[in-house]
Image (cartoon, rainbow, N blue to C red):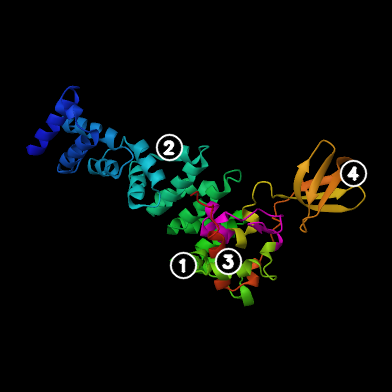
Amino acid sequence: MFVYSVLATLAAEDDKPNSPAASSPLAERTSVAFEALSRLPDGGVSDKPQIKAAVTKALASLRGRPEFVKLVQKFQLADQNDGLLEIAVASSSTDIGVEAMRLILANKDFDLLRATLQGTNASTAIKTVEALGNTGENQSVGLLLPILTETKRDPNLRKQAIRSLARTQDGAAAVLKLAKEDKLDDTLKFTASSELNSVRWQTIKEEAAKVLPLLAGQDSQPLPPMTELLKIKGDPGNGAKIFNRESTGCFKCHQINGQGADIGPNLSTIGTKLGKDALFEAILDPNAGISFGYETHQFELKSGDEAYGLLISETADEVAVKDLKGIVTRLKKSAIGERRQLKTSIMPTSLQLTMTPQELVDLVEYLFSLKQPTEK
């Protein structure tokens, strides 16, 4: 009875602007309401108007917080999915965010999830995909699988969809099926290979080794999956040496703090922009994520000559192309017979063949250490 008395008092005082409760800090009142509600039995409140009113007021104050999820779960509410999704997106890799996503799935609000996945906010869509995968529930497969064949969607969204699908046996099998039917884009095969070759389901893992084999490393030995590479401790000092090593040749295209060639993207602060997983992928699968402005172009001239490289400028009369040696050539448009933007990166593939797995990890550790200087 004490709990009901507290709830009744809070509800009544909420309606009186000059009451002591109204003048007390909102956080304190919300905390008291949450504590009182937590002591009630679990179950629906549709037939309990007083409790329902208290829950509704508490949820309005708790939106975005873990307590919001706990109350929705406790009272089996099916009309709070927007608030749950906010938390799932904000905390897609935490227990509370994943639990929020599980509640949305339990409420079968697939329209809300589809609208979010199809929305124009790529970051929100990616976090939604991540949270769906982290639930480990097969209900997510039907939501995520279509993303893989939508070629105009954000590449990072599609890659995250593969990672999330690989969290369930049904999802992993569906990705493998697309690969076997040759319906998986080349841009997704590296991610699919890395994920499916490290799943716990032996049959899928064995089949993936045939359909999507891991990249070969030095001495033709298979490179460990991404999940394993991320566990290895790297030495950034040795990574700096590998970056400048002739056989690896990173310095021939990239600058770091003014040193190196100005052809590919400047890497002076790359560790601020990309995580280790993205750095591994950029090295091992350079064609999958070509930076804007670094697309390669092929020009066939009417004279029979060719030009290949990065398009650095274009006017009404001519284009300027920088080749892999950093040499800029200016071409009159009247001399160009055909021009094409290619889907391949200027960065060479198979760089992992020049390194041991440990050296590759060291290189990534070095690149990840390159951060934006902090202001003093």
Q: Which residue is mark 1?
A: 231
Earlier sequence position, callout 2 versus callout 1: 2
- 214 sits to left or right of 71: right
Q: CA distance from mark 2 to mark 1?
A: 38 Å
Tag on residue 363?
A: 3
Residue at position x 53%, y 46% in the image: 147
Q: Nearer the viewer, residue 61 or 28?
A: 28
Could you tell me which secondary element the residue under label 3 belongs to? Answer: helix
Whether residue 20 is visible: yes
Residue range of the region highlighted in magenta in the rendering: 252-281
Asked if residue 267 lies in the magenta stretch, the reply is yes
Q: CA distance from mark 3 to mark 2?
A: 44 Å
Asked if residue 24 lies in the magenta stretch, the reply is no
Tag on residue 111?
A: 2
- 243 sits to left or right of 302: left
Could you tell me which secondary element the residue under label 4 belongs to? Answer: helix
Q: CA distance from mark 2 to mark 4?
A: 53 Å
Could you tell me which secondary element the residue under label 2 belongs to? Answer: helix
Q: Amino acid at mark 2?
A: Asp
Q: CA distance from mark 3 to mark 4?
A: 43 Å
Q: Amino acid at mark 3?
A: Leu
Earlier sequence position, callout 2 versus callout 4: 2
Q: Amino acid at mark 1?
A: Lys
Tag on residue 335?
A: 4
Residue at position x 38%, y 47% in the image: 91
Q: Nearer the viewer, residue 106 or 60?
A: 60
Earlier sequence position, callout 3 versus callout 1: 1
Q: Quadrant of residue 324?
A: bottom right
Q: Amino acid at mark 4?
A: Ala
Mark 3 or 4, which is nearer the eye?
3
